[in-house]
Structure formats: C-alpha cells, structure tokens
Image (tube, helix red, strand yellow):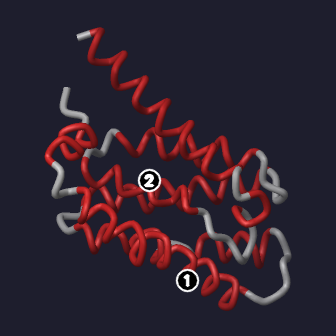
Amino acid sequence: MKEIRTKTMVRQALIAAIYFVLTITLGGFAYGPIQFRYAEILNLLAFYNPINAIGVTVGVLVSNIGSPLGIIDVIFGTLHTVIALFFITKSKNLFIASLWPTVFAFIIGFELSVLAGIEGGFLLLSAQVMLSEFIIMTIIAFPLFKYLEKNSKFIETISLKE
C-alpha cells in the first residue's frame, strides 16, 4: 500500500514539474490576455485518471507564482484549473473534456480585466483566453490524445493503474 502511494506521489510530482517547465519556457506568453500555455495539454491527463488533476493543479499553482500578476494569478489561475479539471474528470467523452478549460476561461478574463485592470474589457479578454484554450485543448490536445489512445502502452501508463 505504501508503495502505491509513493508511486502516485512521484507521478503527480512529475506532472507538476513538467507543467511548470513547459510554462516557464514560454516566458511572457504564458501569462496575460494573449497566452499560449501549451502545458495546458496536460489537463487531459485528468480525463484518463482523476488523480492526475492533483499534479496539473500543483503545476499551475507553482507556475503562477512567477506570474507578473502576482497572487491574483495564483488564486484565479488555479481556481480556473480546479473547476475545469473537475469537469474533465466527470466527462465521458474526450472531446467534451477538451472544451472545459475554454468554457471556464471567463474566470481568467475576470482576473485580467477586473482585478489586474488590463485594458480591453471583460468580454474581449475572456474571448482572447478562450481562443487560446480552445486552440491548445481542442485543436491540439484532443487529436494528440486520440492518436496516443491507439497505443495500449501509453493508455496503460497514462491511466496510472496501480
């Protein structure tokens, strides 16, 4: 039993670390109204096993500590992720799962427009983040994971069956 918990903790730490590294490699493109955070692809790991939401959430939280927006990005960026991941874990269809981060991107739009005071207004800033999430999650991540699903070893590994 202890070995299973250790494996799970290590896997979640690896997911968090990968998310963090992928985010910081983007520099300023990982934050703000025009963001292209390709680490978001990792959100779909929660579709295959809900425990993976822990690693992704920790990765987002740690990545947002370095945000130019400071603590509000830590709070609202992580909140966006937690809500989107909850719905991803409840989804029965990968395509639908890929849409949840886009649906809840208005949380980031609120953060940027109201709390950070970035010009453009709530609707425009929300739309920009939604477009980014849609491109990353539905245009890129969905077909990538559909392709990877064909590999039984990948599914066995990603599902993290202990």
Query: Going 27% across and 73% down the picture, which residue do you hit?
Result: 95
Disc 2 to disc 1, C-alpha distance: 17 Å
Q: Position of residue 68 (x, y in %)?
A: 84, 57
Q: Residue at x 36, y 69 (%)?
A: 98
Which mark identifies residue 42? Answer: 2
Q: Position of residue 96 (x, y in %)?
A: 28, 73
Check disc 1 and give the amino acid type: Leu
Of the residues under marks 2 and 1, which one precedes in the sequence?
2
| Residue displayed at 25% across by 50% down | 48
- Name the residue that disc number 1 marks: 131
Q: Which amino acid lies under the numbered mark 2 shown in the image of this protein?
A: Leu
Q: Position of residue 113 (x, y in %)?
A: 77, 78
Please give left or right for residue 69 compared with residue 146 in the image: right
Q: How many residues crowd around disc 2 within 10 Å: few (fewer than 14), some, or many (20 or more)?
A: many
- Please identify the quadrant where the N terminus is shown: top left
Q: Where, by quadrant of the figure, is residue 144 drawn?
A: bottom left
